[in-house]
Image (tube, helix red, strand yellow):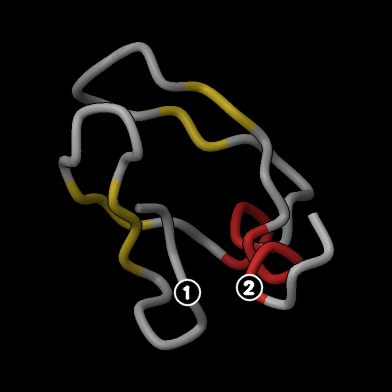
Amino acid sequence: MGVTRESFPLFRCPKCEQTGWIDEDQFNGRVSIVCAYCDYHETVNWAAEEEGKR
């Protein structure tokens, strides 16, 4: 769940699995992602996560 460089800017919520759009700041962990469908709210550097550097 989440996002990869391949799927960006499409994001899949790790909690409810709904999809939405994110921007580059959210992908790089500069601002948080808030799911519109559930209470998921987290700041994750998905770019670093993809490289195993979270």
Which numbered tag is attached to residue 50? 2
Residue 46 lies, in percent from the top left, at 63, 61
Going from the N terminus, do you reach mark 2 or mark 1 first?
Answer: 1
Name the residue: 60% across, 61% down: 27
Give yes or no for contact between labels 2 and 1 (Cβ–Cβ under 8 Å): yes
Residue 45 lies, in percent from the top left, at 72, 55
The residue that disc 1 covers is: 4
Q: Quick one: which residue is furthest to the bottom in this view?
A: 6
10 Å neighbourhood of mark 2: few (<14), some, or many (≥20)? few
Q: Against 52, is 19 above or below?
A: above
Judged from the image, the secondary structure of the residue bearing numbered disc 2 is: helix
Q: CA distance from mark 2 to mark 1?
A: 7 Å
Say left or right for 37 vs 13.
left
Q: Quadrant of the C terminus?
A: bottom right
Residue 19 lies, in percent from the top left, at 20, 50
Name the residue: 44% across, 64% down: 3
What amino acid does circle 1 point to? Thr
Name the residue: 28% across, 51% down: 12
Name the residue: 19% across, 23% down: 37
Q: Against 41, is 50 above or below?
A: below
Say left or right for 12 vs 31.
left
Which numbered tag is attached to residue 22? none
10 Å neighbourhood of mark 1: few (<14), some, or many (≥20)? some
